[in-house]
Amino acid sequence: MKVDNTTSLCILKNLGFTWCPGCGLGHAIHYALHFDFQRSIQEHILGIPATLIIFYQSCKAIYTINKTNNYGPATTFTNVS
């Protein structure tokens, strides 16, 4: 695993640890989205399931928003005499 000397907001990395479960999960999701599943599993075992859950939740949210918003005409005429 490559360790870079850039600044980070990760508390564990700033304390000197070389592996952080949060950073590992983020890297694993990145690799899973790029279809590099072997490297994703090396970074964190839950990377691929997390990617699938995030994808499912995103699709579900988009579907719900489109279903609840009525994209019909702005005005409707009823009982016009």
Image: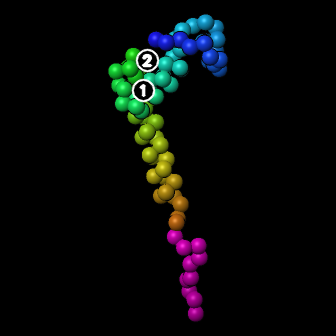
Dot 2 amino acid type:
Glu
Q: CA distance from mark 2 to mark 1?
A: 9 Å
Image quadrant of residue 45? top left
Q: Give the class, few, some or many, for how many residues have Cα within 10 Å of label 2's Cα (few <14, many ≥20).
A: many
In this rendered view, identify the residue nearer to me: 41 or 79.
41
Q: Residue at x 49, y 47 (%)?
A: 61
- Magenta stretch bounds: 72-81
Horizontal side, residue 22 vs residue 8: left or right:
left
In this rendered view, identify the residue nearer to me: 2 or 11.
2
The residue that label 2 is drawn on is 43
Q: What kind of colouring is applied to the model shown?
A: rainbow
Could you say which disc has been placed on residue 31 in the image?
1
Q: x and y percent of residue 58 in the render?
A: 47, 43
Residue 10 in sight? yes
Do callouts 2 and 1 mark residues in contact (Cβ within 8 Å)? Answer: yes
Q: Is residue 27 above or below residue 70?
A: above
Q: Is residue 59 above or below residue 69?
A: above
In this rendered view, identify the residue nearer to me: 2 or 58.
2
